[in-house]
């Protein structure tokens, strides 16, 4: 017997039968959430709920913290909205409002979390969904910060510091 992964198990539970699942994969259409025979698109809140089970022990602590901070605020900002109806301007406005007055690295991190969220939903549930963060204006607005290069200390200064040390142990540092 074939072992079912979580993704396959979800697909079986949504589509109801293997034939529907294969037909959905063969036609390259997104697997819809089905309620009876009515097709329902994914809401923002539902998508956020789908991400949280995957942010377990396989991710770094700061990654999980970033998801836990940003995604509930994203769901609260767009209640009862379909992911497909969100525009790039709305996502830009959300990120700008949330990151106003913050450092450039913080802005970039929040943009990266939201980009990863849209990519996860597209890869896991809806291949037709466009990543709203994958637009030139957002990429330019949330570029990674450029750090100033470190100031190099001259070799003579370092040698002088080493040889002026009174203890031999301090010279080894």
Image (tube, rainbow, N blue to C red):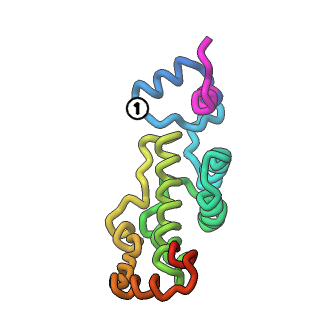
Give the vertical position of 62 relative to 17 (above or below): below
Q: Is residue 81 visible to us here?
A: yes
- Residue depicted at 67% across the width and 45% down the height: 53
Q: Name the image quarter holding the N terminus.
A: top right
Residue 89: say if magenta. Answer: no
Q: Is residue 106 visible to us here?
A: no
Locate residue 49 relative to residue 150 in the image: left or right. Answer: right
Image: magenta residue range: 1-12
Point out residue 160 in the picture as x, y percentages from the top left corner.
41, 87
- Residue depicted at 48% across the width and 21% down the height: 22
Point out residue 46 in the picture as x, y percentages from the top left corner.
64, 49
Disc 1: which residue? 28
Residue 5: say if magenta. Answer: yes
Front residue (pair 1, 85): 1
Point out residue 92 in the picture as x, y percentages from the top left corner.
45, 70
Give the vertical position of 152 relative to 136 (above or below): below
Residue at the far top: name it: 1
- Residue depicted at 34% across the width and 71% down the height: 140
């Amino acid at each position: 017997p074939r072992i079912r992964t979580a993704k396959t198990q979800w697909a079986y539970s949504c589509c109801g039968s293997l034939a529907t699942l294969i037909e959905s994969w063969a036609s390259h259409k997104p697997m819809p959430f089905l309620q009876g025979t009515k097709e329902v698109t994914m809401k923002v809140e539902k998508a956020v709920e789908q991400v949280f089970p995957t942010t377990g022990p396989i991710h770094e602590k700061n990654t999980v913290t970033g998801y836990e901070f940003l995604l509930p605020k994203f769901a609260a900002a767009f209640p009862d909205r379909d992911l497909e109806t969100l525009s790039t301007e709305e996502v830009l406005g959300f990120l700008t409002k949330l990151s106003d007055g913050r450092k450039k690295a913080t802005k970039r991190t929040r943009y990266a979390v939201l980009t990863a969220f849209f990519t996860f939903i597209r890869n896991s549930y809806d291949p037709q969904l466009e990543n709203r963060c994958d637009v030139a204006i957002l990429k330019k607005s949330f570029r990674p910060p450029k750090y100033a290069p470190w100031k190099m200390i001259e070799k003579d200064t370092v040698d002088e510091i080493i040889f002026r040390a009174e203890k031999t142990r301090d010279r080894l540092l």
